[in-house]
Amino acid sequence: MYGWMGRLLRIDLTTQKITVETWPAEVRERFLGGRGLGTYIIHKEVGPAVNPLGPDNRLVFTVGPLTATKVPTSGRFSVSTKSPLTGTVFDSNSGGIWGTRFKKCGFDGLIIQGRAEQPSYIKITDDQVEIIAAGEYWGLDVHSATEKLLQVTGDKDYSVACIGPAGENLVKMAAIINDRHRALGRGGVGAVMGSKNLKAIMVKGTKKVPVADSEKLDFVLYETNKWIKANPITSQGLPEFGTPVLVNLFNEMGIFPARNFQTSQFADAGKISGETIAKTMTVKKTGCYACPIQCTRITRTRNNTGEGPEYESIWALGPQCGISDLETITEANYLCNRLGLDTISVGVTIGFAMELQEKGLYNTGLNFGEANKLLDLITDIARRKGIGAELADGTRALAAKWGGESFAMQVKGLELPAYDPRGLQGMGLGFATSNRGGCHLRAYMVGPEALGVPKMVDRFSTVGKAGLTIFYQNVNAAVDSLILCRFLGLAVSEEYFARLLSAVTGETYQPQDLHVIGERIWNLERLVNLREGFTKDNDTLPARLLTEPVSDGPSGGRVVDLAPMLNEYYRFRGWDSAGVPTAAKLAQLGLLGLEAI
Amino acid sequence: MQVTLKVFATLRSYLSSGETVHTHDGSLRVCDLLRAYYIPQDEAAIILVNGLHSSLEKELTNGDTVSIFPPVGGG
């Protein structure tokens, strides 16, 4: 076997039992690894009766067949679970080096179940697996816990993924942070880890990933790297300015929401742009393991240093809350990393609380633009203190209690990211149909609709958007299973992904195979969500985006024209008009019978 | 007529202020405007006129805002 390690590690924290399982070749072929493998396990082991924060939920860390190889951007890993924030099947992936070191321990996945009696951490050193009491680490922020674990171990070749106080306090937007700054950010995966009384997982491996055809791999790598260098986005745009380069572009286009999507432009965008960060804050550039793109910025404020903020975080902690002070936004970003919080969900929920105040629905004491309150508020969310306790369960829960559903900017419970889909119709469809709720990365329609990658399409048109959205949802599900960074796709297509996979595994994959695998993963995720009680009614957007036209600017007068796109989407997916995969589609994908499990 | 030119990211090496008001008599296309500031056409990957994607051949009218970006990505 090449590419895969062929083994899964299972740790039951209740019984402290540690087992090593093999996983069948048939599952590898059908789901690859990463998100695909995670979805397969969640579908098999986590039924609708399982409480996301109960011991029966699974926290499944996975890597893919390309992880820990020489393939650029392959230093990624993923976690799958039933999300306490959304109630859907959920996966989140991250860069850094943790995934590489985990795979080198000889595993493709780590399934965590049960709940430890006392706070614990897991230490994996190749085949040696220990569950160790973590009492002295409980309560520490991510950086302190990471430093202390590495110090006590006395070996810097370990990589730490851990939760902060937010995860310990079961905050539903808690992240798991690895290698100090990288986040398995979304969906409250940190709360699931906290519910298991698990503070950290540290890994160090020395095994090699077997590669079937090194010569062929070197050749495809040579070509791939050539494309990365030749592509101006991956060779200049991202390394030079990182993701914040999008601030000005999207603001100019009128798709940069502000004040909880009340407007689609932000007057102070220039103050928080990638250009401004590069000029005033960037200390140096860095990146994930095995990545030539190096889009990460190490930045400095008056008092601190850290990584980021990325585009999404700038927006969520800035314009979404009416805040334009870059220093505060950056400090807030550092703070979220230290406390183990998802910046997007935190910012969107705070912005929503600000509008609840503005509309007189709930006296949160928070007003748009109040930068001076932001840092304390974030700390209170992580500690579930005061108003922070209300915000800790996310936008959907806040709206259920205090009203304002029409401007609660979430889909299936996941807070929306930094794009106003009223000016990007396909993005609107992508948000509405995403299996993990309001997410920009499932389809990443911003590529064709705003960036012209691979080709520019009319962003205001609904024509053809269903087919395009499905195409990208499928291919990205496969990319998340290999696992590669979405940014590699800016330079090379799935043809290269298939060639890389073929060289590493020794099995022949065509680009079309990746589409089919992605489609299979997508449909299995859909089956899990249907089993959880989600219906067509959940494939929608907040009423604000469907009925309140953008007031002015380039997207002025627009709403998302969702219904026609959605109907077409179901038809093209081979689903019935209620959004349920037909028997014919399930048979085609080899999923027949799985809907009942 | 007057048009506002804004350039971003790496293109600021051609116009360090990032923004200028350009006055012109007669007809003016986006490509003419780029030429006036020595901005190579092949570096202008994304061209917006009043926030809407446009081409190099687009005829400008008084009061237009032209925003030029090199190839960018992220998210």
Image (cartoon, coloured by chain):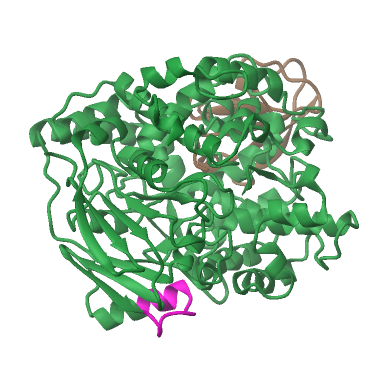
Chain colours: A green, B brown
Task: Give the vertical position of A208 relative to A179 (above or below).
Answer: above
Where does the C terminus of chain A fall, quadrant-wise?
Answer: top left
Name the residue rendered at 33%, 35% in the picture: A228
Q: Give whichever of A534, A371 is nearer the camera.
A: A534
Q: Residue furthest bottom?
A: A136
Q: Is residue A282 visible?
A: no
Query: In the figure, is residue A495 to the left or right of A215?
Result: right
Residue B8, image x and y in percent?
A: 58, 40
Q: Position of residue A478 (x, y in %)?
A: 36, 33
Q: Residue A302 sits in which quadrant?
A: bottom right
Q: Nearer the viewer, residue A441 or A34?
A: A34
Q: Residue at x 47, y 68 (%)?
A: A194
Residue placed most toward the observer, A86 or A277: A86
Which range is magenta? A134-147
Considering every residue shown, the one lying at the far right of the view is A360
Residue A391, image x and y in percent? 69, 63
Q: For this view, does A61 lie left or right of residue A275? A: left
| Viewer-nearest residue: A362 or A322 | A362
Count of numbered marks: 0
- Based on the picture, tell me whether residue A486 belongs to the magenta stretch: no
Residue A413 percent location from the top left of the image: 63, 47
Residue found 76% across the figure and 52% down from its top: A400
Q: Quadrant of residue B29?
A: top right
Magenta segment: does it hold A142?
yes
Q: Residue at 21%, 52% (x, y): give it.
A: A107
Image quarter hosting the N terminus of chain A: top left
Residue A264 visible here: yes
